[in-house]
Image (spheres, rainbow, N blue to C red):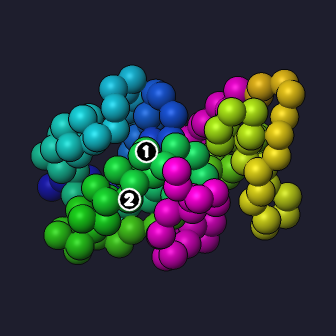
Amino acid sequence: MRKKVDVVCITLTSPIMIGIYEEQKLIEVIESEEKSSDILPEIFEDILQKYDLNALFYVNGPGSFMAIKVAYIFLKSLSVLKDIPLFARDAFYFNNNEPIKAIGKLFFVKMQDDIKTEKLETVPVASFKLPDLLEYKDFSKETAPLYKIAAV
């Protein structure tokens, strides 16, 4: 019998990170420097051959519009086609609430529950990390992308 797992996807920056969780514990990390649009189908083909999926989790923004769109469309389609629940969380959960690059010198910042853009002179490097323990209560069934600034 194959393991039943949850999958967490962080696709906002390179490398993209995919975490495989069994009984809420991180058991495998997949990283790739390739574009999410190219590599997500390949990664999930392997995952689906190896595991039974319980639920999908993803970072719905803010960050790269294209990365958010690609992840959302891919994971939402997989969710519907395979009848797997999809959950989301903002990117600040995975980077210790550090500023996230928006455009130019603008960065997304989070204060309490409010996400805004702010001009920063020094350029912080957002570093994302998969949690060792997956806390379902920290994720939402509201999975629409969080763009937070108008698309150009």
Give the numbered dot on residue 86: none
Q: Is residue 145 visible?
A: yes
**Residue 136 or 33: which is nearer the viewer?**
33
Residue depicted at 60% across the width and 52% down the height: 62
Q: Mark 2 vs mark 1: which is more N-terminal?
A: 1
Residue that numbered label 2 is attached to: 72
- Please provide percent x and percent y for residue 92: 69, 50
- In the image, taking residue 90 as reference, residue 24 lies left or right, namely left
Q: Is residue 27 visible?
A: no
**Residue 75 or 85: which is nearer the viewer?**
75
Q: What SS does tag 2 mark?
A: helix
Whole-Å distance between the Cαs marked 2 and 1?
8 Å
- Please provide percent x and percent y for residue 85: 35, 72
Residue that numbered label 1 is attached to: 67
Is residue 129 highlighted in magenta?
A: yes
Q: Residues within 10 Å of mark 1 (few under 14, many from 20)?
A: many
- Quarter of image, res 129: top right
Q: Which residue type does callout 1 highlight? A: Ala
Which residues are the magenta region? 125-152
**Residue 47 or 143: which is nearer the viewer?**
143
Vertical side of 91 occupied by 87: above or below? below
- Please provide percent x and percent y for residue 144: 47, 69
- Point out the image quarter for the N terminus: bottom left
Residue depicted at 48% across the width and 28% down the height: 14
